[in-house]
């Protein structure tokens, strides 16, 4: 798995496997899934990605964040993004 974050576009691309991209499935306005000719997930693009890794606005630093990618049979089942701010956790889950 490879991840790339474009700070200017505030977009993150997560490449889950090698392969030729045949098409893109729009899950919602902020999440797109690239698939191969068989429908297997190749990668995931998150727009407005910074909102998933919320910042401590007083210190302007990331405190903690993690991402969980759920796959089954070569396909993306879901994507969970968890961020810690102080003692509180925020989680966003996308089901595909």
Image: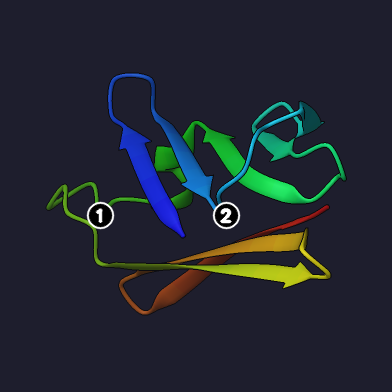
Q: CA distance from mark 2 to mark 1?
A: 33 Å
Q: Which residue is mark 1?
A: 56
Asked if residue 36 is positioned above or below residue 11 in the image, the reply reads below
- Left or right, residue 36 beside residue 65: right
Kindly state the secondary structure of the residue where label 1 is placed: loop
Colour convention of the picture: rainbow
Q: Position of residue 51 (x, y in %)?
A: 46, 42
Q: Position of residue 52 (x, y in %)?
A: 48, 49
Q: Residues within 10 Å of mark 2 (few under 14, many from 20)?
A: few
Residue furthest out toward the top: 8
Asked if residue 11 is positioned above or below residue 80 in the image, the reply reads above
Residue at 83%, 70% (x, y): give it: 73
Residue at 67%, 36% (x, y): give it: 31
Residue furthest out toward the bottom: 87
Residue furthest out toward the left: 59
Residue at 83%, 37% (x, y): give it: 37
Using the image as rendered, state which of residue 69 and residue 28 is in the foreground.
Answer: 69
Numbered circle sitting on residue 17: 2
Q: Which badge, 2 or 1, comes first in the chain's sequence?
A: 2
Asked if residue 73 is positioned above or below residue 49 in the image, the reply reads below
Q: Tell me where residue 91 sits by quadrant.
A: bottom right
**Mark whose residue sits in front, 2 or 1:** 2
Using the image as rendered, state which of residue 93 and residue 6 is in the foreground.
Answer: 6
Q: Position of residue 79 (x, y in %)?
A: 66, 60
Are the two marked residues, 2 and 1, in contact with CB atoms closer than 8 angstroms?
A: no
Residue at 87%, 45% (x, y): give it: 38
- Left or right, residue 6 beside residue 61: right
Using the image as rendered, state which of residue 89 and residue 50 is in the foreground.
Answer: 50
Q: Position of residue 59 (x, y in %)?
A: 12, 53
Q: Residues within 10 Å of mark 1 (few under 14, many from 20)?
A: few
Asked if residue 76 is positioned above or below residue 86 in the image, the reply reads above
Kindly state the secondary structure of the residue where label 2 is placed: loop
């Amino acid at each position: 798995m490879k991840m790339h974050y474009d700070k200017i576009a505030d977009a993150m691309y997560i490449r889950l496997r090698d392969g030729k991209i045949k098409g893109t499935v729009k899950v919602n306005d902020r999440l797109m899934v690239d698939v191969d000719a068989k429908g297997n997930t190749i990668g995931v693009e998150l727009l407005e990605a910074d909102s998933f890794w919320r910042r401590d606005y007083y210190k302007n630093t990331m405190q903690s964040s993690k991402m969980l990618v759920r796959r089954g049979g070569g396909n993306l089942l879901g994507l969970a993004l968890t961020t810690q701010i102080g003692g509180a956790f925020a989680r966003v889950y996308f089901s595909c």
